[in-house]
């Protein structure tokens, strides 16, 4: 096919996805979709294979592909022009029930030529806890409505009975209706634009271009893999739920032009909802793989072909029905993200040509904190603390990680302003700032995470409650690379002050200054009532290389800018400061002593 | 008032590369001037440009300025200060506990925003731009106001003094002050200004509550910091320009363009440097709107293709779209700014083959004006879009820039063959046609996306093509978008300057307050009363009263629990009554559904008002453009020859008529395929299109 037409069609396919994303955000109007960019739109070929993945939460690209395939199997002979199907069953294809897929066949002159698919995290799904993450769930049946495939729109007409039934099962049905409407509008735009493309260039030409695009991506990834060294790399991730600790163990093998991700050795599935299904694991390993290995390759089926996944059945990364999975996206899936990021980082770092593409782990621990209750204007507020989207960048082999730089699996997230949250929820922030010493130390430092504290403010019921499913408080998980240390762990603290207690914490600027009993919380539903406070701090990115090799001037600058404390500068980096300047002789002494101690320790081991 | 001999209105726009001037007088032809911009002393280029226009009128610079009654100005000085990091040493005082708001940029937002999709997909290689304020020059103070504007913790004077002194000790020249919720209650911020004035009267101090009284502390803080950072340079620049103009014989007012498309007197503009950001492109949109009105076609897609970028803006029924999240360089700011979207596709954009796929692409790298396209012969070795234009016969090597520069066709062909055509396995011509089509398709896709974003259909619009290169591509993307018609304006090459003389004095006022849509009209009127009083006072001080004052109210509304706010003009009489309030809500609902799509409204949640805006205009005198009497359609007198050019419909070269714009007269009709050469631009009329010279010497292209 001629390269000009190919180039134009490819560009237009990008734009089809882009315009559909705009439509999704417009119609939805919700904070999680618009601020967190917790969404995805992609195009699929007639057989459901990925054609053009958009920028969004990337672990959905392969899962939505499976959703299309599941619909093709289930509805064979009953897939008609103008239909739209809903699917949110994690054991069929979805990640968890609250991330609903709407998939739509695209027909041209009566023939099925492609699919479009999208998701948003809906306002509520009727699980036992509000907002979709259900730490109290015991099985999939307590995680809300779930469908392995249902026709919501039939030949362009909304099926009112189905619509009403779904909305009858959720809290805030009007908001869920809006989420669903946004996805319908999004699929409609994708279909219209795709058909316009076919009309201009002809169905055969477009089909040929799509086939070429996939072929090209496969060829390019295989070439890249061939350039990278063969070998085997491992990562072990821990996650805890309700006091129990689980492991996700990944062995990644690179052989010639193939990559095998083997999760053998991971923990058996949990009774708690941190598990994930195999489709979720597959998505979880592709989410970092797309931007880390395929940053200049179109994200489609061609990228998927050279990759194999082995996930033992009944394990935490391939659980069996009816295990609960509602917390998967911040639970086992994120551990898979981290493990894949770590092993891919090691593979890249082992190559002279690609070393600059290596990164240590970014933002290993999301925390889903859904606040719910009556707000200052008397209405119901349910919503996630969007700070969970403000992760920290991992260090690179040429530079520090970006402080509060986000995450790899969702490259364009952001958090809401304090003022936006205080206007929507009956709470007040005491502080929200970078967290000193949170970035993983190294020759290049991981980006810093943050810390915040909130208290009730002007709440008609005296406060509100929150559902929390937060991991990463027990172990640091943003792994370093090449001798770099991990980013600091997360922490979630319920500061409980009895009603008659002191009120000195009204303007506290640190956790220590907040009076009251401090109780770690991570799993379940807790109050933020009366004089309660909630303190959250979250991880920095991992470091790269030996912290003792870090330029002392860079450490001094970190101290001045508040990224590193004087104590850590001395203890971890071996840098002595005189005021804000480096004490060169003192630093030399300290670093020499530290190296001697390491040698002595190694000799003893 | 101006003496009778003062007849001219002069407008000069300083852009990144060129400084453009336009001179108007009633009953006289429009005159244009052009010179190179002269950073960092931009004022020199301003005089050069006016001198160039004066020369074409047979006058000296001094003669022209002595006979000028109004001078209007737009300049890239503030953008330049930020881009080159050449501003004041700035400190920030903010609410304790939130010192990092500026540095953290709402998380990854500051890392990815402003980047192309290609770069967003490659996060390992992305960075956040270092802030304009260093971390150790940010001081938190004990103070707090809540979401209602209640002061929970008043700022103590001693605390304010401590903070100001800490910054002075670090040698700051400017202080930005931004506290949480200060836009509801500026008391604590004002305390800092009072202290700063007392301790350091020379330090440039900016309050967020003055400058950007809108919710969203990150954007508000960033705005305040940019203003403080560029404040002194802006003030010095405008002062020196005023002095230079006076010294050269001018003694009228100096008006300065703002990014929201209105003018401010120089003295006021000097205190709000942030307002000048992107004011050139904004003036371009104002110019397009004026032209749309003149031609009685108020729905316009305005496109501008220069050396490095392609810019688009949309004007619907004369109404201008404002940017939702404006940025300068990589920094966000919260100020009303006309939306102009750009991509890196201009005449200087480098054509390359994508590694791996071998697909041809245009940009985003640019050869700029130095070394520039290969055909300029200034050392450029990578083929650019301009080289492609020449290879497909659109540019005439002999007539470029009025024949003042001879283009190297052979050199361009060699470079293009080697780097593009041969690797693609195509002939020079086939490859050049292809690259041209790729560029046009990328532009078509961009415009489509922008109109979709606004819920609009390009078929309802007239397309204006500005800039040196746009006339060579507009015929293709205009046809594919199916716009009504194309207009290549007479002032195409100096459009921003044209916009300057089409603008009014505009002051923007706003009050943030969240009220349900059912709020009684008198409560809303009470919010407006102080803004109206202030506006009338401000305009009176500038000499505007009576029918030279225009007040426009608009209100931001949204559906509760949704994030999209829509600025809705108040179309009813003001002050409002109950019927007027109902009309406002009805208009909002219609606008919302148009913009965000059918079914997007969530009425059940209720509607609320979030911001009350007042636009106050001092109506400027307009030059009267005299239409020429149209003559016959026969354009043969301007025909200079025939040569083969690429004709899209034919898929290859066809002979085309070549015209000299200077000899075309109003009423003349040019049938495509044809090329019209002007001294500055080239207009290609594709097969199946016909170009008509209108009475204002614009070229109107219609599709058969």
Image (spheres, helix red, strand yellow):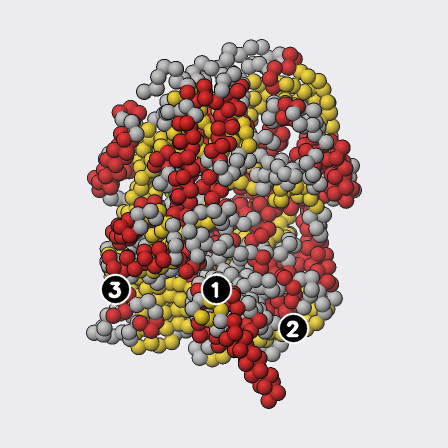
Residue under label 1: A557
SS for tag 3? Answer: loop
Q: Chain of mark 3?
A: A
The residue drawn where x is 41% and y is 23% is B249
Q: Is residue B194 left or right of residue A31?
A: left
Q: Mark 1 or 2 closer to N-term?
A: 2
Distance from label 1 to label 2 (Cα)? Answer: 34 Å
| In-front residue for pair B116/A51 | B116
In contact (CB < 8 Å): disc 1 and disc 2: no
The quadrant holding residue A451 is bottom left
User: Residue A236 placed where, x, y %?
Assistant: 57, 75
The residue drawn where x is 73% and y is 35% is B412
Quadrant where the C terminus of chain B lies? top right
User: Residue B133 placed where, x, y %?
Assistant: 43, 54
| In-front residue for pair B702/B596 | B702
Residue found at the very far bottom of the displayed protein: A604
The quadrant holding residue B99 is bottom left
Distance from label 3 to label 2 (Cα)? Answer: 53 Å
Residue under label 3: A461
Residue mark closest to the camera, 1 vs 2 = 1
Residue B450, compared with residue A274, is above or below; it is above
Q: Chain of mark 1?
A: A
Residue A201, compared with residue B133, is above or below; it is above
User: Residue B163 placed where, x, y %?
Assistant: 32, 58
Q: Residues within 10 Å of mark 1 (few under 14, many from 20)?
A: some
Quadrant where the N terminus of chain B lies? top left
Q: Is residue A222 left or right of residue B17?
A: right
Residue under label 2: A233
Residue B434, compared with residue B190, is above or below; it is above
User: Residue B256 placed where, x, y %?
Assistant: 40, 33
SS for tag 1? Answer: helix
């Amino acid at each position: 096919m001629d390269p000009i037409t190919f180039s134009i069609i490819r560009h237009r396919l990008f734009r089809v996805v882009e315009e559909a994303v705009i439509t999704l955000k417009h119609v939805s109007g919700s904070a999680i979709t618009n601020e967190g960019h917790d969404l995805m739109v992609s195009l699929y070929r007639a057989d459901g294979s990925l054609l053009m993945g958009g920028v969004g939460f990337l672990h959905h690209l392969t899962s939505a592909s499976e959703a299309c395939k599941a619909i093709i199997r289930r509805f064979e002979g009953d897939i008609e022009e103008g239909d739209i199907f809903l699917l949110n069953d994690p054991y069929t294809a979805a990640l968890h029930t609250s991330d609903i897929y709407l998939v739509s066949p695209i027909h041209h002159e009566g023939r099925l030529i492609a699919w479009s698919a999208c998701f948003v995290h809906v306002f509520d799904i009727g699980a036992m806890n509000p907002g979709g993450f259900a730490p109290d769930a015991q099985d999939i049946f307590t995680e809300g409505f779930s469908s392995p495939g249902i026709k919501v729109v039939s030949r362009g007409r909304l099926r009112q009975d189905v619509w009403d039934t779904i909305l009858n099962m959720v809290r805030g049905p009007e908001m869920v209706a809006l989420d669903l409407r946004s996805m319908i509008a999004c699929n409609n735009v994708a279909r219209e634009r795709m058909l316009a493309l076919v009309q201009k260039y002809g169905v055969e030409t477009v089909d040929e271009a799509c086939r070429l695009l996939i072929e090209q991506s496969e060829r390019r990834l295989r070439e890249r893999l061939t350039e990278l060294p063969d070998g085997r790399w491992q990562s072990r991730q821990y996650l805890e739920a309700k006091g129990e600790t689980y492991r996700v163990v990944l062995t990644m093998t690179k052989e010639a032009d193939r990559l095998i991700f083997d999760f053998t050795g991971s923990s058996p599935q949990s009774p708690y909802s941190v598990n994930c299904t195999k489709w979720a694991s597959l998505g979880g390993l592709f989410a970092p793989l797309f931007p880390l290995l395929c940053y200049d390759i179109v994200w489609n089926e061609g990228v998927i072909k050279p990759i194999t996944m082995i996930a033992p059945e009944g394990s935490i990364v391939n659980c069996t029905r009816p295990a609960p999975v509602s917390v998967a996206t911040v639970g086992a899936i994120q551990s898979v993200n981290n493990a894949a990021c770590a092993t891919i980082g090691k593979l890249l770092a082992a190559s002279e040509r690609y070393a600059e593409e290596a990164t240590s782990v970014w933002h290993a621990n999301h925390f889903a904190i859904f606040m719910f209750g009556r707000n200052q204007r008397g209405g119901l507020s349910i919503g996630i603390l969007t700070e969970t989207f403000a992760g920290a960048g991992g260090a690179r082999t040429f530079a520090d990680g970006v402080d509060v730089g986000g995450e790899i699996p969702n490259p364009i997230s952001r958090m809401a302003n304090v003022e936006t949250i205080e206007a929507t929820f009956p709470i007040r922030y005491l502080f929200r700032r970078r967290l000193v010493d949170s970035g993983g130390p190294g020759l290049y430092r991981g980006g810093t995470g943050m810390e915040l504290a909130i208290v009730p403010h002007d709440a008609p019921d005296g406060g509100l409650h929150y559902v929390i499913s937060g991991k990463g408080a027990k172990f640091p998980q943003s792994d370093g690379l090449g001798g770099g240390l991990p980013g600091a762990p997360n922490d979630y603290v319920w500061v409980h002050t009895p009603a008659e207690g002191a009120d000195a914490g009204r303007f506290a600027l640190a956790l220590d200054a907040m009076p009251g009993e401090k109780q770690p919380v991570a799993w379940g539903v807790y109050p933020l009532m009366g004089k309660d406070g909630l303190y959250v701090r979250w991880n920095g990115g991992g470091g790269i290389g030996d912290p003792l090799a870090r330029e002392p001037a860079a450490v001094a600058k970190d101290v001045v800018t508040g990224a590193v404390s004087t104590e850590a500068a001395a203890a971890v980096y071996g840098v002595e400061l005189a005021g804000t300047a480096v004490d060169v002789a003192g630093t030399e002494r300290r670093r020499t002593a530290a190296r001697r101690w390491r040698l002595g320790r190694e000799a003893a081991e | 008032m101006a003496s009778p001999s003062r007849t001219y209105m002069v407008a000069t726009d300083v852009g990144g590369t060129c400084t453009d001037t336009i001179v108007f007088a009633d009953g006289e032809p429009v005159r244009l001037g052009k010179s190179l911009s002269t950073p960092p002393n931009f004022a020199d280029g301003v005089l050069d440009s006016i001198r160039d226009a004066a020369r074409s009128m047979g006058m000296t610079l001094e003669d022209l300025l002595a006979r000028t009654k109004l001078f209007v100005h737009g300049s890239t000085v503030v953008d330049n200060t930020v881009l080159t990091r050449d501003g004041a040493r700035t400190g920030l005082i903010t609410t304790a506990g939130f010192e990092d708001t500026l540095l953290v940029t709402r998380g990854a937002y500051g890392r990815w925003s402003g980047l192309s999709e290609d770069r967003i997909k490659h996060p390992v290689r992305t960075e956040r731009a270092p802030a304009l304020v260093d971390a150790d020059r940010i001081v938190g103070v004990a103070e707090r106001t809540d979401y209602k504007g209640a002061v929970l913790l008043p700022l103590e004077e001693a605390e304010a003094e401590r903070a100001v002194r800490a910054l002075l000790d670090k040698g700051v020249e400017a202080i930005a002050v931004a506290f949480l919720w200060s836009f509801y209650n500026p008391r604590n911020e004002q305390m800092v200004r009072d202290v700063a004035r007392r301790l350091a009267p020379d330090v440039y101090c900016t309050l967020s509550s003055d400058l950007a009284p809108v919710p969203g502390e990150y954007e508000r803080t960033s705005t305040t910091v940019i203003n403080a950072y560029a404040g002194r340079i802006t003030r010095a620049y405008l002062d020196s320009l005023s002095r230079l103009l006076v010294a050269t014989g001018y003694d009228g007012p100096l008006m300065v363009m703002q990014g929201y498309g209105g003018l401010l007197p120089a003295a006021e503009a000097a205190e709000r440097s942030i307002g000048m950001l992107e004011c050139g492109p904004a003036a371009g949109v104002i110019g397009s709107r004026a032209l749309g009105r003149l031609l009685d076609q108020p729905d316009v897609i305005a496109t501008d293709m220069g050396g490095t970028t392609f810019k688009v803006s949309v004007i619907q029924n004369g109404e201008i779209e404002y940017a939702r999240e404006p940025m300068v360089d990589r920094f966000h700011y919260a100020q009303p700014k006309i939306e102009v979207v750009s991509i890196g596709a201009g005449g200087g954009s480098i054509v390359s083959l994508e590694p791996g796929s071998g697909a041809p692409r245009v940009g985003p790298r640019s050869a700029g004006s130095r070394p520039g396209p290969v055909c300029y012969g200034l050392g450029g070795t990578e083929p650019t879009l301009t080289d492609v234009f020449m290879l497909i016969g659109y540019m005439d090597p002999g007539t470029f820039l009025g024949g003042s520069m001879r283009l190297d066709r052979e050199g361009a062909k060699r470079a293009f063959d080697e780097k593009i055509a041969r690797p693609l396995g195509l002939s020079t011509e086939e490859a050049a046609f292809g690259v041209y089509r790729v560029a046009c398709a990328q532009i078509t896709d961009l415009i489509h996306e922008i109109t979709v974003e606004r819920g609009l259909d390009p078929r309802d619009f007239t397309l204006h093509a500005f800039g040196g290169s746009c006339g060579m591509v507009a015929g293709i993307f205009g046809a594919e978008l199916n716009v009504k018609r194309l207009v290549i304006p007479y002032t195409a090459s100096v459009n921003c300057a044209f916009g300057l003389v089409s603008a009014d004095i505009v002051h923007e006022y706003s009050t943030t307050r969240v009220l349900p849509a059912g709020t009684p009209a008198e409560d809303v009127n009470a919010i407006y009363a102080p803004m109206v009083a202030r506006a009338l006072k401000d305009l009176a001080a500038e000499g505007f009263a009576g029918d030279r004052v225009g007040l426009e109210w608009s209100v931001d509304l949204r559906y509760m629990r949704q994030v999209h706010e829509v600025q809705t003009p108040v179309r009813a009489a003001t002050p409002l009554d109950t019927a007027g309030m109902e009309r406002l809500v009805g208009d909002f609902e219609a606008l919302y559904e148009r913009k965000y799509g059918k079914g997007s409204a969530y009425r059940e949640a209720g509607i609320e008002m979030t911001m009350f805006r007042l636009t106050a205009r001092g109506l400027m005198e307009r030059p009267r453009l005299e239409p020429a009497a149209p003559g016959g359609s026969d354009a043969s007198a301007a025909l200079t020859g025939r040569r083969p050019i690429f004709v899209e419909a034919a898929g290859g070269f066809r002979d085309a008529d070549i015209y000299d714009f200077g000899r075309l007269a109003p009423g003349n009709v040019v049938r495509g395929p044809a090329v019209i050469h002007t001294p500055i631009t080239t207009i290609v009329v594709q097969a199946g299109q016909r170009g008509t010279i209108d009475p204002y010497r614009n070229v109107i292209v219609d599709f058969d």
